[in-house]
Amino acid sequence: MERLFQVQERRLARTSLEIVRQMINLINWDDRLISIRGSRGVGKTTLMLQYIKMNYGQGTRKALYCTLDSFYFNNHSLLDLTEEFYLHGGRHLFVDEVHKYPGWHKEIKEIYDAYPDLRVVISGSSMLHLLNSDTDLSRRCLPYYMPGLSLREYLRFYKGISLPSVKLDELMANPGEIAAAVTAVCSPVAVYREYCREGFYPFYNGNKEDYYLRIENVVNFIVEQELPLLAGLQSGYARKIKAMLGVLATSKPFALDVSKMSRMLELNRETVMTYLHLLEKADLLYLLYSDVTSVKRLQKPDKVYLTNPNLLTALASDNVDEGNMRETFVVSQVSPFFKVEYGKEAGDFIIDGRWRVEVGGAKKGFSQIANLPDSYILADNIEYPSGNRLPLWLMGFLY
């Protein structure tokens, strides 16, 4: 165990507290068992280490961070570590990459039952399941989902500009006030363009080639390792799945044709639908439906989006459709915390069952949503709202 503390000390020494994501204040760290899910690269590990550093400090023996893909666990069990940690006064255990540890459900449940005054944080893939046939952790565990950076967080991380997040109803009621506060400190249209290229993941270092390579590595890891491990997918299908992502990245969102894609990838329709749903669980796609209350398993989605515009740029290179980019941006900013439906004939999206929005350029017309209540245009290339025409970039301030 001492070796794990030494590793923790090195990691804490390298963990900066200069910028801490707002999510650290949204999590109830005092709960006995919480889970933090999210795609690889969004900052889950950093968030846990920052919490330890802020609340326990370096040199602590009360809190311990460990990752279950460490060589340490080739010869030690999580149960044994927990027992030793607890007997030596440890009270807050942070367990990363939990999905890589065989039988983790059972051991976490046993830890929960055996140590009522021990707080445990588990973190892992977006595909992390809290429910299986042997142990139902969903009743014991408080789950959280961690998305990538919003446009607002990008401003803070990379531009040193701090602005508050806003609630959706507040944004719709007072868009002019919010737009004025943002435009007073930056050029939001230009920042939006930058964000769509390099703002979603918190590891941009100024080199775009390195950044896109790291995004490709994230995709490769999910497709080649997480999907086989967590979904039982045969690794030999990785090439087909990457080809599917490439097709989606260069298509218009409304142009998805499952039959055409089946022929292109030489896969049957059912397999294509299975892959789409797996990629959604893996946090690489958003699948949108016109009626979320009646969605059935493997139902064909009305629209399909990659989960963020940086992923779109990395996979499509210079072939990104502008309409796809705009809509992907909106979905990526809204979906983590609100229900998003396809608007069908009237608008692109219905947000939170109420707000109907049409996404487009600065001259986008109201014909599709004319006379509908709570309907708005989200327009690119404008700084200030005009009536129900709102700047597209405003959606980036919801978290």
Image (cartoon, helix red, strand yellow):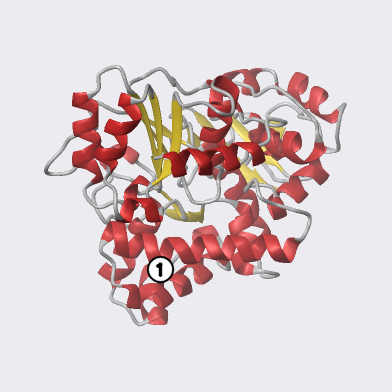
Q: Is residue 146 above or below residue 92?
A: below
Instruction: Identify the residue at image location x=76%, y=26%.
Output: 162
The quarter of the image holding the N terminus is top left
79 is higher (above) or lower (below) than 327: above
Q: Which residue appears at 37% of the width and 51% of the height? A: 72
90, 210: nearer the viewer = 90
Judging depth in this view, the residue of 385 and 332 nearest the camera is 332
Residue at 26% x, 39% y: name it. Answer: 80
In terms of depth relative to the viewer, which is nearer, 349 or 144? 144
Mark 1, other Cα within 10 Å: few <14 / some 14–19 / many ≥20: many
In this image, 320 relative to 90: left or right? Answer: right
Residue with the most extreme left position: 134
Image point (69%, 18%), residue name: 174
Relative horizontal placement of residue 174, taking residue 281 as reference (left or right): right
Q: Is residue 261 above or below residue 279?
A: below
Which residue is tagged 1? 224
Q: Is residue 130 visible?
A: no
Going by the image, does 170 lie left or right of 103? right
What percent of the width, then of the height, locates residue 84? 31, 32
Q: Position of residue 286 (x, y in %)?
A: 45, 50
Q: Position of residue 215 (x, y in %)?
A: 59, 60
The image quarter in which residue 321 lies: bottom right
Secondary element type, mark 1: helix
